Image (cartoon, helix red, strand yellow):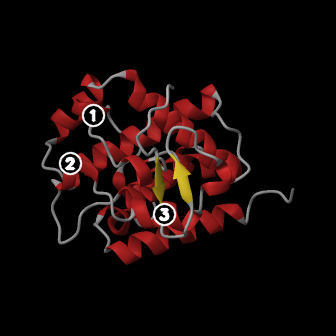
Amino acid sequence: MARTNARAWQRMLSGRRLDILDPSPVDVELTDIAHGLARVARWNGQTTGDYPFSVAQHSVLVFELFRAGNPDCTAHSQMQALLHDAPEYVMGDIISPFKAVMGGNYKDIENRLLSAIYLRFSLPATVSAAVRKQMKRADQEAAYFEATHLAGFDPDEAIKLFGEPGHAAFEVEQFDRLIQPWPTRQAYDRFIATFESINALVPAR
């Protein structure tokens, strides 16, 4: 991507300066990701509850759905599922209608950021086709549950947009706690705790 004279980096609370156009894994910090995602609202904030439903909470929900649907998945693929929306700690959550009319530069930047994030945590820079399909399924299931429980969609409308979930809500452990919007601090803490629980399963390198 061509560079301009405009500033293309963001200073993070950790002190890191992340180059948006050419991100380095060295400048990626877990605390920055969790801090940002816990403050980014899904659905442009158009959800019920006293708190926005954050991307951090969505990420934990997707991880739980991914794990429920793929009980034999590796720790690496679980980590990729948790971090699937991690670029949004920089870019924000761009809703699907906007994505449909934006040019390719948005997706290119998102992919660069995601690759840097994966490399930072010793994951492959890209996701295999099989895991990508499983992650997409979990992401769509999460969107269905969020749409019907929080965003005012009726089930038929949500099925048309996101497909029918492969799991009933009661089949997902602690689903009621996962779908009720968390305060910012809880979203941050749960994201970090989920990351650490997965990381403990990763074979020693």
Q: Is residue 45 left or right of residue 131?
A: left
* Residue 97 at x, y percent in the picture: 22, 31
Q: Amino acid at mark 1?
A: Ser
Which mark is on residue 50?
Answer: none
First in residue order: circle 1 vs circle 3? 3
* Residue 62 at x, y percent in the picture: 45, 50
Q: Quadrant of residue 38?
A: bottom left
Residue labelled with disc 3: 12
The 10 Å Cα crowd at callout 3, few under 14, some 14 to 19, many 20 or more, is some
Front position in the image: 142 or 4: 4
Tag 1–tag 2 contact (CB < 8 Å): no
First in residue order: circle 1 vs circle 2? 1
Mark 2 or 3: the one toward you: 3
* Residue 186 at x, y percent in the picture: 40, 76
Q: Amino acid at mark 3?
A: Met
Which mark is on residue 148?
Answer: 2
Q: Amino acid at mark 2?
A: Thr
Which residue lies at the image location 41% right of the left edge and 61% below the top edge?
A: 36
CA separation, marks 1 and 2? 17 Å
Q: Taking 69 as reference, is 186 above or below it?
A: below
Is label 2 in a helix, a strand or a loop? helix
Q: Is residue 43 left or right of residue 152?
A: right
* Residue farthest right in this picture: 205
Residue labelled with disc 1: 96
Mark 1 or 2: the one toward you: 1
Total marks placed: 3
The 10 Å Cα crowd at callout 1, few under 14, some 14 to 19, many 20 or more, is few
Is label 1 in a helix, a strand or a loop? helix
